[in-house]
Image: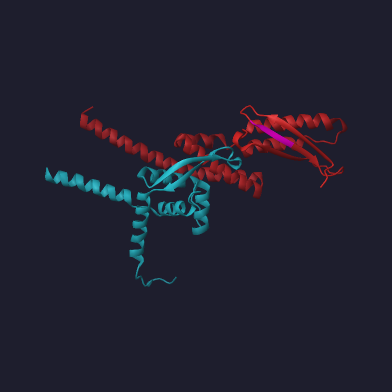
Amino acid sequence: LSTAVLRIANFFSKREHMEQTLSTLEQHLLLAVIGLHPNAYGVSIQDHIKERTGREPSTGSIYASLDRLEEKGFIKSRQGEPTAERGGRRKIYFTITAPGQHALKASLQALDALSQGLAWKGAAI
Amino acid sequence: MNKYYESSFTITMREGGVIQQTVWQDHAEDKTFHIKLDFDERHFPSRQSIALALLDLKSIMASTYGSVGTFDCAELDTLIAQFQDATNPPGFAEFMLTTLLKPARAEAVVGDLNAHFTRDYAKFGYNRAARFYWARTLRSLWPLLWRAICKAVKWGAIIDWVRWKVGL
């Protein structure tokens, strides 16, 4: 019985850890949401990421990731106004939450810790 | 600058609000009729309203200038078609997006694609903008479809586990 309890506890702690980790796109999205506050919506986020990284994620992948981040409680959304250039469709604005900031900070610190003191040997850049 | 000819029409929309149309020519030899549509952002006109307003304008212009043969309605037809295309994403793409997403999210995604289209249309013209629109839509479908599959599989696994536990 104790082994089973341990396994269940292990499963849930692993799952919790997985939910706290962020993919590269999720990191980019959270950084863009902070940078564009309070004007972070689909197109502005996409433009911001393209401008800073040179890569343009698709509208679908942005919304799929934003959906996942909202489910984790890292961001929240509110409906915006319809505009002429959008064919009368409403925007959705995103803002980061405290758990979101915490997860992003932890994720960036982990990257920093891994890259600190690297000599960049072994391959010519 | 004094305009050779200027006229304004007001069209009342079914959904409320009005579209103000202004038509002008810069000088007597000017073969182009410039058209400006103004509308209240709070009562955003649907594409049908814009098309109807333009059709209305077309009949007014045709009755005014048709007899002297100085006004060609063909350009207005193109304009109407472009207005309809410009605010109307391909039906199948919109259907896919609304199936895969919650209504509010689908509205935002279609709105974003429209915003890109409007920008591309101003830069490259209709044909290239339409091609880009399709490319963007197709690129967007896979991540959304994958997410929907993952959700379905996850809920399927949970339901199976509960059934197995309860013995159904």
The reply to whether residue B38 is visible in this rendering is: yes
Residue B4 located within the stretch drawn in magenta: no
Question: In the image shown, does A18 or B147 lie closer to the viewer?
Answer: A18
The cyan-tinted chain is A
Q: Position of residue A125 (x, y in %)?
A: 44, 70
- Residue at the image position 70 percent from the left and 31 percent from the top: B53
* Residue A116 in picture, x, y percent from top left: 35, 68
Q: Within the image, what quadrant is residue B148 found in?
A: top left
Q: Is the magenta stretch mostly helix, strand or loop?
A: strand
The residue drawn where x is 32% and y is 50% is A20
Position of residue B141 in the picture relative to residue B90 (left or right): left
Seen from the viewer's position, the closer of residues A82 and B57 is A82
Nearest to the observer: residue A64 or residue A101: A101
Range of residues picked out in magenta? B17-21
* Chain letter, colour red in render: B
Name the outermost residue toward the left.
A1
x and y, in percent, of residue B145 in the image: 43, 40
A16 is higher (above) or lower (below) than B94 = below
Visible in this render: residue A61? no
- A112 sits to left or right of B59: left
